[in-house]
C-alpha cells in the first residue's frame, strides 16, 4: 500500500493557489507573470525539500529528478503550472503537486529507485496569455517550437513571448536545449474537467486516449438585402444556411453517439444589423472523437453536409482548419501499470478518454504515455468554482505513485 500524506497534499494545493490568488477560490497565473515566477520558485523549493535534484529548463519548466541506481532513460510525471484567466486551483496545479508528492513518497517509503524518476512543473499549457502557444512547455520538450515563434507569438499588449521570457531571466535562444531525448515513459495526473467520473461515483479515471480535435473557421457568403422589402423567395441568406448547417453537423455527432462531440461556439455576422439579411456569416466548428478512424469519417461527413447545404442555398462556402490535432492513444503497457496499481490499492476506477487536450499528447511523440484523472465536482473546470476533494486527489496520487513504483523499482 502506498501511504500518501493527505495533509501534505492539501497544504501544497492551498499554498500554490496563493500565487495569483483570484477572489475566494480562483487563480489567475499566466506564463512569465510575477505570480508564475513565484509559483515556479515555490515548486522548486518543494522539490528540493523532497530530496530531488532540481533544474529549470530553457522555457522555465521546473524539473525535479530522483536518480535511479541503474541510470538509463527517464520515467517522468507532471503537469502545467499556468492557469486560465481566471481558472481554479486544480487544473494543472494538481498534476504538478501529484508528481512531486509521488516522488517524495516513493523516496521516503522505498528509497532509491532502479529507474530514474522525474517530476516536472511545465511552464505553460492554457494559451491564456499568448493565444498561439499551443502547449509551450511540452512542445519545448519534444523540440516542437520553431525559432520564428518567439517573435511572432504576442500577448494582447503586443509583448512577444521571447521578450516575456527575457523579462523573467530566460534566454529564448536556448529553447532548442529544452528538448529531451531520454524520456521513456510519461504519466500526467489531471482533474477530469467533465462529469463522467462523478456520474458513475468513481474517484479515478485511467485515460486510454486523448481526443482528436479539429477546429474549422467557416465563411458562408450570400447577399445582403432589406429585411422587409426582399421577399423570402430569392434571398441568399447565409444565416439561414448557418442554422441548417448547425443542425446538420451537430446531428452527425449525435448520430455517432458518445464520445463524439461537435460545437459551434462563435458566430460573426456581417453587417450584423437587425433589419438586414447578412452578407456573410463566419463561424467556428469544433469537432472531436478519440478514435482516429471515426473522427476522420465524422469530419468528412460534416464537410460534405456543409458543401451540400451551401450549394442548395446558392451560398459560397470556404473554410480553414487552424487547429488539427490527431487522436493520441495511450500506451497499453502504461495503462496496464495504472490499472494494476489502482486495483492493488483498492481504488475504484474506470477506463476513459480525455475530451480535452493535454501536454501528454505532445509528449506522446517521444515517450510512452498515459494519464490519470481525478473526479471533478459537478464536472466543472476553467472556473474558480472548479473543485476536487482532498480524498479524490489522494486517491489519484496513490494510483500514480503505485504505478511509478511498479515501473521504477
Ligand atoms: Zn490543464
Image: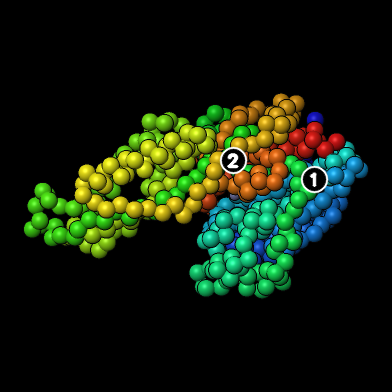
Q: Which residue is mark 1?
A: 74
Is disc 2's CB within 8 Å of ligand 1?
no
**Nearest to the observer: residue 380 or residue 66:** 66
Residue at position x 66%, y 73% in the image: 167
Residue at position x 82%, y 38% in the image: 408
**Nearest to the observer: residue 330 or residue 43:** 330
Eyeballing the image, is 163 above or below 374?
below
Cα–Cα span, label 1 and label 2:
21 Å
Q: Earlier in the sequence, mark 1 or mark 2?
A: 1
Q: Secondary structure at mark 1?
A: strand
Mark number displayed over residue 42: none
Q: Is residue 260 left or right of residue 71?
A: left
Q: Residues within 10 Å of mark 1 (few under 14, many from 20)?
A: many
Q: Is residue 162 left or right of residue 180?
A: left
One can see residue 133 in this view: yes
Q: Is residue 362 left or right of residue 380?
A: right
Measured as percent of width and height from the top left, residue 203 is found at 62, 33
Measured as percent of width and height from the top left, residue 298 is found at 42, 37
Measured as percent of width and height from the top left, residue 192 is found at 58, 40
One can see residue 60 in this view: no
Residue at position x 78%, y 48% in the image: 182
Eyeballing the image, is 307 above or below 322?
above
Q: Is residue 205 left or right of residue 55?
A: left
Is disc 1's CB within 8 Å of ligand 1?
no
Measured as percent of width and height from the top left, residue 194 is found at 52, 40
Is the residue under label 2 in contact with that under label 1 (CB below 8 Å)? no
Q: Which residue is mark 2?
A: 328
Residue 149, picture quadrant: bottom right
Q: Secondary structure at mark 2?
A: strand
Amino acid at each position: 500500500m502506498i501511504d500518501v500524506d493527505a495533509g501534505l497534499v492539501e497544504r501544497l494545493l492551498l499554498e500554490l493557489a496563493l500565487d495569483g490568488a483570484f477572489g475566494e477560490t480562483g487563480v489567475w497565473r499566466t506564463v512569465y507573470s510575477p505570480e508564475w515566477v513565484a509559483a515556479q520558485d515555490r515548486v522548486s523549493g518543494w522539490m528540493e525539500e523532497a530530496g530531488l535534484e532540481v533544474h529549470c529548463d530553457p522555457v522555465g519548466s521546473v524539473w525535479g529528478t530522483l536518480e535511479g541506481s541503474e541510470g538509463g532513460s527517464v520515467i517522468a510525471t507532471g503537469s502545467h503550472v499556468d492557469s486560465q484567466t481566471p481558472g481554479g486551483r486544480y487544473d494543472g496545479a494538481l498534476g504538478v503537486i501529484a508528481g512531486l508528492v509521488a516522488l517524495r513518497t516513493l523516496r521516503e517509503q522505498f528509497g532509491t529507485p532502479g529507474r530514474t524518476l522525474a517530476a516536472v512543473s511545465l511552464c505553460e499549457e492554457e494559451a491564456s496569455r499568448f493565444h498561439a502557444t499551443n502547449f509551450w512547455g511540452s512542445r519545448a520538450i519534444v523540440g516542437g517550437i520553431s525559432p520564428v515563434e518567439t517573435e511572432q507569438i504576442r500577448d494582447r499588449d503586443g509583448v512577444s513571448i521571447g521578450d516575456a521570457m527575457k523579462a523573467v531571466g530566460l534566454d529564448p535562444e536556448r529553447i532548442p536545449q529544452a528538448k529531451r531525448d531520454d524520456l521513456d515513459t510519461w504519466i500526467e495526473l489531471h482533474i477530469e474537467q467533465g462529469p463522467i467520473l462523478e456520474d458513475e461515483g468513481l474517484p479515478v479515471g485511467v485515460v486510454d486516449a486523448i481526443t482528436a480535435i479539429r477546429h474549422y473557421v467557416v465563411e458562408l457568403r450570400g447577399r445582403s438585402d432589406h429585411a422587409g422589402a426582399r421577399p423570402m423567395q430569392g434571398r441568399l441568406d447565409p444565416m439561414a444556411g448557418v442554422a441548417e448547417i448547425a443542425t446538420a453537423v451537430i446531428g452527425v455527432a449525435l448520430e455517432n453517439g458518445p464520445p463524439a462531440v461537435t460545437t459551434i461556439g462563435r458566430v460573426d455576422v456581417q453587417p450584423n444589423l437587425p433589419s438586414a439579411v447578412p452578407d456573410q456569416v463566419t463561424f467556428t466548428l469544433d469537432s472531436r472523437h478519440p478514435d482516429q478512424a471515426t473522427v476522420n469519417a465524422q469530419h468528412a461527413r460534416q464537410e460534405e453536409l456543409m458543401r451540400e447545404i451551401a450549394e442548395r442555398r446558392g451560398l459560397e462556402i470556404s473554410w480553414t482548419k487552424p487547429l488539427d490535432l490527431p487522436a493520441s492513444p495511450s500506451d497499453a503497457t502504461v495503462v496496464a501499470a495504472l490499472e494494476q496499481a489502482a486495483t492493488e490499492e483498492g481504488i475504484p476506477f474506470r477506463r476513459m478518454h480525455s475530451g480535452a487536450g493535454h501536454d501528454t499528447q505532445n509528449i506522446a511523440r517521444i515517450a510512452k504515455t498515459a494519464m490519470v484523472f481525478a473526479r471533478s465536482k459537478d464536472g466543472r473546470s476553467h472556473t474558480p468554482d472548479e473543485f476536487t476533494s482532498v480524498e479524490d486527489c489522494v486517491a489519484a496520487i496513490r494510483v500514480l505513485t503505485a504505478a511509478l513504483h511498479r515501473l521504477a523499482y
